Image (cartoon, grey):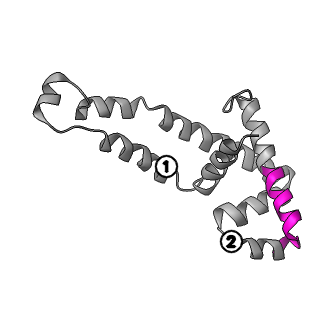
Amino acid sequence: MKARYYRMIEKYLYHYYEPEVLVQEVRDYYISRMNYSKTTWLKGYNTLENQAIKLMDSRELKEIREWVAFLKKVLTFFYEENSKYYNFINYKYFQKKKKSEIMHIFELDYLAYTELNMKIIEDIYSKAVLEGLIEEGK
């Protein structure tokens, strides 16, 4: 698994309950690219209308919706089948507890904590590949 997929999965987990933060980042990106001059409006380059259309058709917004739905299924699976994974995700990503607190709760040393975190992310990664959210060869 590449580091960018690891970071991407963690980003979606951290923002699972607040995906509007990610949506706002995409909106801000398109708004910042807008050009307000009269000549660009006449020529049709990066106008408000063009940026609004790009935003509505945005691949990033579609990806955010797909990941939120996917993580909902994965978390339901973990809740029913592997409560240790679910609780770890809950403490780390949703409640945003410190690493030392999580290590104390699960009675883990640093190496076991790191291995558990990697195992969970790899499990989510493999499920994302099966769902088609991540292309394995890229």
Residue 114 position (above or below residue 131): below
Q: Between 39 and 87, which is closer to the camera in this rendering?
A: 39
What residue is disc 2 on? 97
Residue 112 position (above or below residue 33): below
Quadrant position of the C terminus in the picture? top right
Residue 36 in which image quadrant? top left
- Magenta span: predominant SS is helix
Q: Between 130 and 72, which is closer to the camera in this rendering?
A: 130
Q: Is 117 part of what is drawn in magenta?
A: yes
Q: Amino acid at mark 1?
A: Leu
Look at the image and tell me whether residue 83 can be seen: no
Q: Position of residue 9 (x, y in %)?
A: 67, 47
> Who's the residue at 72% across and 31% down the image?
131
Q: Position of residue 4 (x, y in %)?
A: 65, 43
Q: Amino acid at mark 2?
A: Lys
Look at the image and tell me whether residue 61 can be seen: yes
Number of marks in the rendered image = 2
What residue is disc 1 on? 22
Quadrant position of the N terminus in the picture? top right
| Magenta span of residues | 105-120
